[in-house]
Image (cartoon, helix red, strand yellow):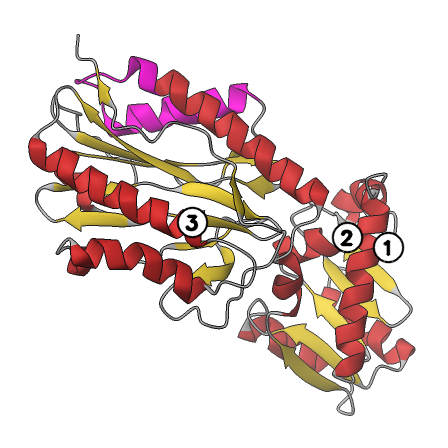
Amino acid sequence: MAEATPQAATAARLERLRRRMAEENLEGLLVGSPANRRYLSGFTGSSGWLLITADRAELWTDFRYLEQAAAQAPGFEIVRHEPDVYRHLGRRIQELGLGRLGFERDHLTYAQWERLRGALPEKVEMVAVGGWIEELRRIKDPAEIAAIRQAARIADEALLEVLADLRPGVTEREVALQLEFAMRRRGAEGVSFDLIVASGPRSALPHGTASDRVIEAGDFVTIDYGALYGGYASDCTRTVVVGPAGERQRRIYDIVLEAQRRALAAVRPGATGAEVDRAARAVIEEAGYGDHFGHATGHGVGLEVHEGPRLAANGRDDVLAPGMVVTVEPGIYLPGWGGVRIEDLVVVTENGGEILTRVTKEFLQLAVS
């Protein structure tokens, strides 16, 4: 079967969205969040609005992006908006005779809402919509999965390059910069997030972004990294030891690795986020470290590095389905001593899950020269 063209993918996404609009009796929907705007139209510019009705798809942007919008969003009518976009949108909504207009409640600021409301006739009902497009984005099509797969490959190759030269005496920030450069050199558009490089006692910080701390022999080094490719993110974490490891380091690492193994085995269609989380958390709790694993086991990844579904204790309503891409990332964090996190990126398949990140999870002791 031939792969769907970008325009065909856009048409299919709009069709699903319009079905939801019809179910909720919405005559129009205004979309301004960058990720949702890109998902529906393909447009990557930093400024723009989508106005979707039952029979129209308009992309509103300014002079800077007109040619780009026409090239990236062929299924949309491109509208060059006036300096006061809200007044211009208001006139257009009135021209179309829209009575019930949806807007993204999670992305429209109160100030923007005030300006838009002030530009609309009183008879137009503004309806707050939450999570509709994000729900569509949970299931990735083959082109999306291919982009995420490539982002993961780029990031993993870059990490292997950096690990080969990781030695005591360099700072966490230097490691992060080397890793970002290595990813960009391989074709990454950027990084998925501020890279985490946390060493020694700082490895107990789950989100310990790189600092000026100098890495020392015997340190745990946790590296949480990801690349952007085609607008899609990857996300992976590895924890290594620089030089000889201690017995406690090996023990903690083995517990986290077993927790991750159990959670990966639980990833399958029909499983809930809570069930996958429980599979990992039970191992860590049984080992006596339940109080030191305080974050969710995972999350969805796509155009944003954190999106639905959630693999968490409160994820009972997050049911996994083929095409979803999630992380599985249990950890143990001991303040003042250090921590371990092991994270893989997984696409849910018809029969379980396929791991997209390929860097070894063996307990790595990096040579000290």
**Does the CB distance between marks 2 and 1 fall below 8 Å?**
yes
Describe residue 185's horizontal placement relative to residue 266 as left or right.
right
Q: Quadrant of residue 171?
A: top left
In the rendered image, the vertical position of residue 288 relative to residue 145, given as above or below:
below
Please name the residue shown 49% across and 62% down the image.
271
Q: Quadrant of the N terminus?
A: top right
Q: Quadrant of the C terminus?
A: top left
In the rendered image, the vertical position of residue 185 relative to residue 63, given as above or below:
above
Query: What amino acid type is highlighted by mark number 2?
Result: Ser
In the image, which is nearer the foreground, mark 3 or mark 2? 3
**Does the CB distance between marks 1 and 3 fall below 8 Å?**
no
Label 2 CA crowd tier, 10 Å (few <14, some 14–19, many 20+): many
Describe residue 128's horizontal placement relative to residue 176 as left or right.
right
Where is mark 3, residue-wise?
A: 265
Which is nearer the N-term, disc 3 or disc 2?
2
Label 1 CA crowd tier, 10 Å (few <14, some 14–19, many 20+): many
Query: What amino acid type is highlighted by mark number 1?
Result: Phe
Front-most of 239 and 171?
Answer: 239
352 within the magenta span: no
Q: Which residues are magenta?
A: 163-186
Where is mark 1, residue-wise?
A: 76
